[in-house]
Image: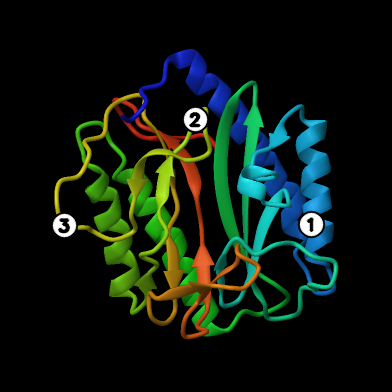
Amino acid sequence: MIAIRQAWEIERIRSAGQVIAGLWKVLGPKVRPGTATSELDKLAYEYIIDNKAEPAFKGYRGYPATLCISINHEVVHGIPRPERILREGDLVGIDVGTSKNGYIADAARSYYVGGAPSPEILKLLATTKQALELGIQSAKAGSKVSDISRAVQQAAESAGFSVVRDLCGHGVGQKLHEEPEIPNYVKSGSSPALAEGMVLAIEPMINAGGHQVKFLSDGWTVVTADSSLSAHFEDTVVVTAGQPLIVTR
């Protein structure tokens, strides 16, 4: 069952989301050559705690860190480590969740490390951002989850890329992962209708190569099966009677 949130609940989710919105401004300038991913994780943890929130990922199903930091062919769930140093030319995806007053928000951004990105990375980043925007604009009361999926899939595939099919967006609120699942491609069968008060984490994960992925031996990190680059953007969105309300910007 998909939760319909009351106004006071949405305000709590928005409050958690605004911690993430502020965190991007702190993390972004630190995504540069020579930075260890563990440094970014420590910075994020301290910022979240200082803003009277909690890191929603840390401890979730045993996950050991505040951020997921995924580099180049890593799609999601890369674990920050002191020996993982960002290098010029890396494509870095950062995913974070925050919990505040019992409610959760979730978002992700992808960054290029260093000076001038390659044309391939520029196109992949632009396409994934566009897929997120189109997905968000499709999150309207009376539409269906499949409308979001279709918008994301069309944006990716029209650019010659593929969407990850083994992972998806999701509802979010009192738990990190709630109903509905939000695939980044159109699945066969019926699709849930969207209603005012639903809260969704929409998260295109787009690969430069094929859509297939695999897990690394750490049990967390998901990589592209063909070692192609991958980008990830995500925002938490409230379905309203009008335009969707984005709470993580």
Residue 175: numbered disc = none
**Which residue position holds label 1?**
40
Coloured how?
rainbow
Res 113 quadrant in image: bottom right
Q: Which one is earlier in the sequence, the residue at label 3 or at label 2?
A: 2
Name the residue at 66% across, 80% down.
116
Q: CA distance from mark 1 to mark 2?
A: 25 Å
Q: Secondary structure at mark 1?
A: helix
Q: CA distance from mark 1 to mark 3?
A: 40 Å
**Which residue position holds label 2?**
173
For disc 3, the neighbor class at 10 Å (few under 14, some 14 to 19, many from 20) is: few
Inspect this view and state whether residue 1 appears. yes
Inspect this view and state whether residue 249 appears. no
**Which residue position holds label 3?**
188
Q: Which one is earlier in the sequence, the residue at label 1 or at label 2?
A: 1
Q: Position of residue 57 (x, y in %)?
A: 64, 45
Q: Position of residue 122 (x, y in %)?
A: 52, 75
Q: Is residue 95 above or below residue 5?
A: below
